[in-house]
Amino acid sequence: MRVNEYVIPLGENARKRHYHQTYKGKVIGFVVQLEVLVDDQWKAVIRYDSAHGFAHIDIYYLDGRKVKKELHLKLGEALTLADEDIKENWKTYQKAFLEGK
């Protein structure tokens, strides 16, 4: 089993946390999330992961609410989507989170 894990600064007060496991070249687990610094604490804004046995997105709100949406994708496809979505849309997600949307 191979594990890759890293944190990438995206801009002021935002970062992407990436973790994935592969076995024989196949993704067997992952977490990719956007985190925003709020009052000196890193808060999850959007998280793609494979917990609970399936690929899904957790969308977090500043007031503490969380919404889960299932992705009907293979784990490798969901991992690629997660990386690309956060890379391209992190500013939009950060703004919406901080505005309570």
Image: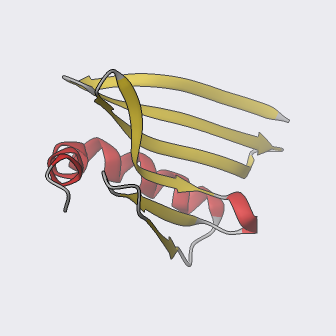
Q: Residue at x 66, y 58 (%)?
A: 50
Q: Quadrant of residue 8?
A: top left
Image coords of residue 18 (percent x, y) = 53, 35
| Colour style of the rendered protein structure | secondary structure
Residue 17 left/right relative to 8: right
Image coords of residue 44 (percent x, y) = 42, 43
Q: Which of 84 and 58 is in front in this view?
A: 58
Residue 96 left/right relative to 7: left
Q: Residue at x 19, y 46 (%)?
A: 98
Q: In this view, does 87 lie above or below 67?
A: above
Image coords of residue 83 (percent x, y) = 42, 46
Residue 53 left/right relative to 30: right
Q: Which residue is drawn at 65% across and 40% down?
A: 20
Q: In which quarter of the image is the C terminus?
A: bottom left
Residue 5 left/right relative to 65: right
Q: Is residue 68 above or below residue 40?
A: below
Q: Is residue 95 above or below residue 63?
A: above
Q: Residue at x 30, y 42 (%)?
A: 87
Q: In which quarter of the image is the N terminus?
A: top right
Image coords of residue 30 (percent x, y) = 64, 47
Q: What count of labels does the image hold?
A: 0
